Amino acid sequence: MRLATDTGGTFTDLAVEESSGDVRLFKAPTTPDNPARGVIDVLGKAAESFDCSLAALLANTKSFVHGTTHALNALVTGNTARTALIVTKGHPDILTLREGGRSDPFDFSIAYPRPFIPRSLTFEIAERIGPTGDIVGPLDLDHARATIKELSGRDVEAVAVCFLWSVANGSHECAVESMLAEQLPGIPVSLSHRVNPILREYRRAVATAIDASLKPVMSTYLGDLESALIEAGYHGPIHVLTSQGAMTDIGEMVSTPILSVNSGPSMAPVGARAVIATEYPDQEGDTVIFDTGGTTCDVSLIRSGRIPRTQECWLGSPFRSDMTGFPSVDVRSVGSGGGSIASVDGGGVLRVGPQSAGAIPGPACYGLGGENVTVTDAALLLGYIDPANFLGGARALDIAAATTALEEKVARPLGLDNDAAAFAILEVATEHMVQAINDITTKQGIDPSKAICVGGGGAAGLNAGAIARRLGCRRLVLPMAGAALSAFGAIEARVSKEFRRVWRAHTRNFDQATASVLLADLKGACISFVDKASPGAKPDISFNVQARYPNQIWEIDVEIDADSISSGSIDQFKSAFHEEHERLFAYCEPESHIEILSWSALAEIPNDHADSDTSLASSQPQMQRRSVFIPESGRTLIPVLAMTALPPQETIEGPAIVETDLTSIYIEPGTSYFRSAAGNLVVSPFGLQDTV
């Protein structure tokens, strides 16, 4: 048995994979004051479902995977360690100058963002490494010791070290690390050439600073989680999800906690890729994933079977916040989820989000003291959610409290009746999500109407059809595992690690000998990692380069055949680069030379589990009817069907409500749907005239 949890802002999701390959899903409220308790709570729900004790469940578990937003929450709220930054003398403004750029270059009323680490905690040390790794200026040991002594009086809790060109030679950073260990024992240290070995000083420096600032926070958090699991009876390996769509050992995460930033959202495309591979094994086009939880809607892509990554992950609004500078799955988030609060501003405009009611007190209908109306309250009052069957009946929803909140906060201020006001909330939330999808699709040359949409998250079913219709998408898949798509993705994730090297090469006069040595070094690092992480495993090792045409500012990722390059041929790489450039930017220059800036190798250890088959028992009867508000016809009695009771492959016309114990899916009028052989709900937003 394998367990995977995903702790979000509102719910903690659990996926349990049995030895047969069957996957069962569970949810429990997140406990913000002690997230580990929320994990134990959802494990307890699973144990109850399996009719055994928690200790017995954990004793039968061979691996545990955990995803969390704890690191991201700490960064957004500023609850990180007091961190100092040590840089090369003469370069103290790396985090202050950043990379430039403004969301609106002519709006000077917006304050320039503060650096992640203030200048008062930025220290310079005399040293200099050249771009080829040569020592241009030796490390001034006396200056270094004096600087570290000064740190001891500043109540510093972590230290980040980022010297110029340390990616070519990290000896000076390592020497400072040794001195810090002697003079400031117990203070965690992050070195830039280990954390993020890339060109571009700001991205390398900010990634190192973020990593250092998270070490005390994540060490405590993961330590508490490990202790709680041990106390509950689990003694097996613990893996933590990474922002790169993979998982790593808990010890690796403690030493490099930046890996966990945005780790939860990175699992949705991993889970969606497994679903699409089952439903459409020949699919070669694009897939759009929207994962709607209680707090946010996270949007991501799958392109030709690959999950795109980016180094431009922002901790807030672009250009107004810091970016992580760390390669991560490309996920765009918008503050629009089931718990998003609706309100009317002073100008009479309805707003939904980004503020969320969270898990406590939650939406008004939770009956825990929440007074704000949310998307969940609106969906309940529209008839999309059964108040007696929320989370399989684990929580009865308070219709009266939701009605009071809706009337006070939205209906009266807008002069609307309750149904119209509730529907308006859903429409605004839908538009926010559509715009987030447009940001990651149309602005990158992807036509969402030609892509498959996958809706995940507990709140996705409330407006997934409306989103797909608004995008012009012809195929919408709502997986059986959709209510906990990220946790399901964690079941599918692999243990992996990426190794990177900076070395500039040019196809005009390619140095094949140096390239061969570098690729062999990367492969050796991958094999060493696998031998330590899973002795005897046969890993998948892939190689990438970051390359560009000469004089371009930014480079693109291109997968390479390491064997062909080592044997002296770069034709395959050149063809792959031109093809990728054409795909991304709609043009290429086949006659141009190519410049390579950095090289990477990814080692992935295949999972040893069977093909997953998600099952969700439903306590609902096979057929009933419920009054639902439909704008065109008003209140209408429509069928309510248990997802597990739908006859496979039989196309049905909407409107309808399709339910599982963890989610409710509203099927709009004019829409057709069927349950696939794999158990997923496949929807045609434009009805029977479309072929799905």
Image (tube, helix red, strand yellow):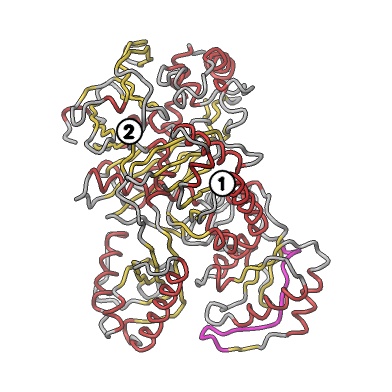
Helix, strand or loop for disc 1: loop
**Horizontally, is 302 left or right of 297 in the view?**
left
Q: Residue at x 31, y 25 (%)?
A: 667
Residue marked by disc 2: 470
Helix, strand or loop for disc 2: helix
**Horizontally, is 320 left or right of 600 in the view?**
right
Residue marked by disc 1: 233
Pinpoint residue 647: horizontal percent, then vertical percent: 21, 26
The quadrant of the picture occupied by the C terminus is top left
The reply to whether the magenta stretch includes residue 126 is yes
Q: In the picture shown, does residue 586 fall above or below 611?
A: below
User: Which range of residues does the magenta coloring cover?
Assistant: 119-134
Q: Residue at x 39, y 42 (%)?
A: 437
The reply to whether the magenta stretch includes residue 201 is no
Pinpoint residue 179: horizontal percent, then vertical percent: 72, 78
**Horizontally, is 306 left or right of 651 in the view?**
right
Q: In the picture shown, does residue 424 fall above or below 566?
A: above
Q: Amino acid at mark 2?
A: Arg
Pinpoint residue 47: horizontal percent, then vertical percent: 49, 36
Q: Quadrant of residue 182?
A: bottom right
How far apart are the two marked residues, 2 and 1, measured between alpha carbons?
49 Å
Q: Residues within 10 Å of mark 2 (few under 14, many from 20)?
A: some
Instruction: Of the two numbered discs 2 and 1 on the same chain, state the one appearing first in sequence.
Output: 1
Q: Nearer the viewer, mark 2 or mark 1?
A: 1
Answer whether labels 2 and 1 touch (C-beta < 8 Å).
no
Q: In the picture shown, does residue 100 fall above or below 281?
A: below
Q: Amino acid at mark 1?
A: Gly
**Horizontally, is 637 left or right of 315 in the view?**
left
What number is the disc on residue 367? none
Q: Residue at x 48, y 39 (%)?
A: 13
